[in-house]
């Protein structure tokens, strides 16, 4: 079953612990991490994680059961 992504964005912080806290706050709001975390090296390192919000599963099941 393929779920539709409604929102996609990248969470960015300066260190892994801060990114963990940020991602956790998104998880509490119904978002999910997408793929693996990654970092962008440079003068100021950025630690990143793609974040998505999927279509509500119950909504999806209901629409799949709707008559054609």
Image: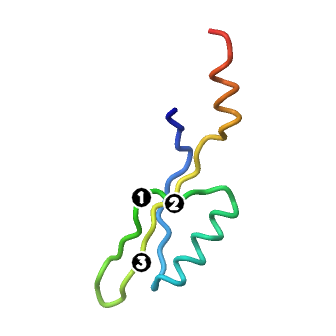
Q: Which residue is mark 1?
A: 35
Query: Which residue was labeled with disc 3?
Result: 47
Instruction: Indicate whether 35 appears above or below 67.
Output: below
Query: In terms of secondary structure, where does tag 1 sit?
Result: strand
Q: Residues within 10 Å of mark 2 (few under 14, many from 20)?
A: some
Label 1 to label 2: alpha-carbon separation: 7 Å
Is disc 1 in contact with disc 2, using a CB cutoff of under 8 Å?
A: yes
Question: Can you give x and y, in whole percent of width and height, for residue 38 in the image?
Answer: 36, 71
Is 27 on the left or on the right of 4, as rendered?
right
Helix, strand or loop at disc 3? strand
Residue 64 in picture, x, y percent from top left? 62, 22
Q: Position of residue 34 (x, y in %)?
A: 46, 56
Mark seen at residue 33: 2
| Residue at the extreme front of the image, as rendered | 1
- The residue most toward the left is 42
Within the image, what quadrant is residue 45 found in? bottom left
Residue drawn at x 65%, y 38% is 57
């Amino acid at each position: 079953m393929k779920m539709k992504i409604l929102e996609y964005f990248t969470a960015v912080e300066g260190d892994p612990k801060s990114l963990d806290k940020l991602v956790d706050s998104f998880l509490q709001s119904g978002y999910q991490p997408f793929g693996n975390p990654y970092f962008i090296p440079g003068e100021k390192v950025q630690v990143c994680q793609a974040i998505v919000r999927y279509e509500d599963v119950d909504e999806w099941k209901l629409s799949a059961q709707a008559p054609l």
